[in-house]
Amino acid sequence: MSQTATTDPQPEASSAPRRRPALSPSRASDFKQCPLLYRFRAVDRLPEVPTKAQVRGTLVHSVLEKLFALPTAERLPERAKELLAPSWTEMSADRPEWTALFDDDEQGEVENWLGSAAKLVDNYFELEDPRRLEPEACEQHIELELDSGVLLRGYVDRIDVAPTGEIRVVDYKTGAAPRQIGEAKAMFQMKFYAVVLWRLRGVVPRQLKLMYLTDGQALTYAPDEAELRRFERTLEAIWQAILRAGKTGDFRPNQSKLCGWCDHQARCPEFGGTPPDYPGWPEPDPGEESPLDRAD
Ligand code: SF4
């Protein structure tokens, strides 16, 4: 089993060697939810306009990452909130299109939005005291090739390792969607990370922890090895199904209540639309996740 773990979350430059197609938790969830949605996102790579809530999630993730880079004694709520405005300045310089989400004419819109991000940061501090933690890694890129050849790839918000060697996988949730809708998807994502870390390190993570910053609640789960073994087979089956659909272009729509969050209804047969011609299986990598995927 080949094993790599890197810390570089930046997209590769176009001159970089092409990476093999991989399965990420976001794209695997897309395929499970609706194969056509997977196609639109991973194969056609149709642009999607992020919501302000999604961009706010990316901002808060960035601030929490920076918080853990500060000396322990400085990891306080006010200091964390001071990081919001400069982080937004950096992010909007990298992605100027995100500034178009805000109406120039509406006075104080950005300030109000930053205020809503500060509330999420406050909620984070209700859940834990970061001065008592020393994470092994934040925004960690993980990648693993299973024996079956399936390449798994993702980014973990935070990995905590106790002196005893026990691993905790932490994910911050900042999304606006109701928790009930996102919870199964979130646990799927956490088990995906757990499989990769288990196979990379030979240790089953002791705890998977989801921190919901909109309502200041946490959900924890302790996976066991038999479960992760079964989940690994599920991931292999999803990848085989993706490859079968990829050969023929037969990605079927699967209408559900989640269609309300889909950007592509206008191209979806379930809503009277017509998908674009199938462009063929993409190169180099339909498994890539965007910062917005990682901050849902
Ligand atoms: S609208 Fe619903 S069925 Fe159509 S592509 Fe989007 S998620 Fe799939």
Image (cartoon, rainbow, N blue to C red):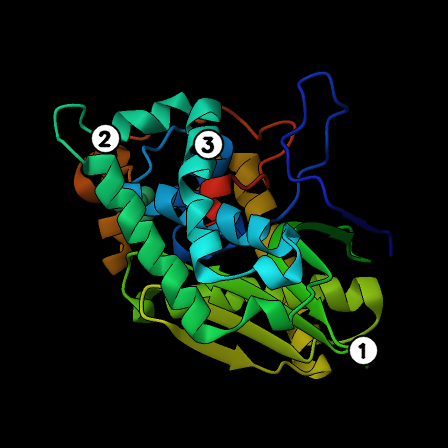
Q: Amino acid at mark 1?
A: Pro
- Estimate how packed mark 3 is, as few (under 14), some (14 to 19) or many (20 or more) residues with alpha carbons within 10 Å: some
Alpha carbon distance from label 2 to label 3: 14 Å
For disc 2, the marked residue is: 102
**Amino acid beneath label 3:** Met
Q: Quadrant of residue 108?
A: top left
The residue wearing badge 3 is 91
Question: Which callout, 2 or 3, points at the residue further toward the start of the chain?
Answer: 3
How many residues crowd around disc 1 within 10 Å: few (fewer than 14), some, or many (20 or more)? few
Where's the N terminus, which quadrant?
bottom right
Q: Is residue 282 above or below residue 133?
A: above
Q: Which residue is mark 1?
A: 163
Amino acid under disc 2: Phe
Distance from the alpha carbon under mark 2 to that under mark 1: 46 Å
Sequence-first tag of 2 and 1:
2
Horizontal side of 241 relative to 114 (left or right) equals right
Front residue of 146 and 59: 59
Q: Position of residue 259 (x, y in %)?
A: 26, 51
The x and y percentages for residue 58 are 44, 45
For numbered disc 1, what is the local secondary structure? Answer: loop
The earlier-in-sequence mark between 3 and 1 is 3
Q: Is residue 193 visible?
A: yes
Residue 134 to residue 5: above or below? below
Residue 112 image offset from top left, x and y in percent: 22, 44
Q: Residue at x 66, y 18 (%)?
A: 14
Q: State the image quarter where residue 84 is shown.
A: top left
Q: Which mark is residue 219?
A: none
Q: Residue furthest top?
A: 15
